[in-house]
Image (spheres, helix red, strand yellow):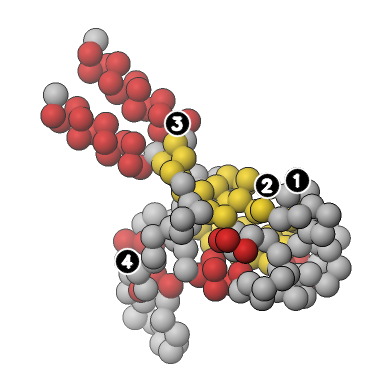
Amino acid sequence: MILLFLILASFMQLCFGVVYKVGDSAGWTTIGNVDYKQWAANKTFSVGDVIVFQYSPQFHNVMQVKHAEYQSCNASAPIATHTTGKDSITIATHGHHFFLCGVPGHCQAGQKVDINVLRASSSLSPSPSPSSSSSTVPALAVPSPSPSHASYWLPSKIGVFLAVSLVLVSFA
């Protein structure tokens, strides 16, 4: 029975995503000089995490774009557009996810964010590779702070299904 509990606890721990509010208490805005690059650099994002953009829909929006559009602040061909003012986006894949505000001038003013989701195996090797001779410290070498007060645990459907299935099988 103790073994079952430990297995169940392990599954539950692996099956939860974190909810991050972009910009923390400031939200998604051009007011207050929020540094979204720094905000994202202080987080360790995982598949299953939920990114919440909270903003005034009268003045802002959220557009998911490709890397080239992100770099040039080009909102003419977004992958997706969000306009509710409280948009929740679940991260489903590893890699970079680029978002910007499509209101003219906002992206150029810094209202853009790169959510980089590393592969789980990458986070196990925190030191840089020997061929890396740059003077910057890789993000993996710096321990990430715990999620802010704006973050909450959110169970994934697959994780809950696996955990319940495990319990049911053990009692059968």
- Indicate which label's residue lies in the foreground, 4 or 1: 1
Query: What is the quadrant of the C terminus in the image?
Result: top left
Cα gap from disc 4 to disc 1, whole angstroms = 39 Å
Kindly indicate the quadrant of the structure image that contains residue 159.
top left
Front position in the image: 26 or 122: 26
> How far across and how far down the image is residue 61, in percent?
77, 55
Q: Earlier in the sequence, mark 4 or mark 1?
A: 1
Mark 2 residue crowding within 10 angstroms, few (<14) / some (14–19) / many (20+): some
Task: Give me the residue at 79% from left, 52% from top.
Answer: 57
Q: Which residue is mark 1?
A: 84
Residue 112's mark?
Answer: none
Q: Which residue is mark 3?
A: 158
- Whether residue 59 can be seen here: yes
Q: Earlier in the sequence, mark 3 or mark 1?
A: 1
Task: From this view, report whether residue 93 is shown above or below residue 172.
Answer: below
Q: Which residue is mark 2?
A: 87
Q: Is 74 positioned to the left or the right of 26 in the image?
A: right
Q: Which residue is mark 4?
A: 125
State the SS at label 3. helix
Residue type (three-letter) at the residue carrying disc 3: Ile
Q: Are marks 4 and 3 in contact (CB under 8 Å)?
A: no
Q: Earlier in the sequence, mark 3 or mark 2?
A: 2
Residue type (three-letter) at the residue carrying disc 1: Thr
Task: Give me the residue at 79% from left, 59% from top.
Answer: 60
Q: Earlier in the sequence, mark 4 or mark 3?
A: 4
Q: Are marks 3 and 2 in contact (CB under 8 Å)?
A: no
Kindly indicate the quadrant of the structure image that contains residue 39.
bottom right
> How far across and how far down the image is residue 75, in percent?
82, 62
Q: Is 62 positioned to the left or the right of 37 in the image?
A: right
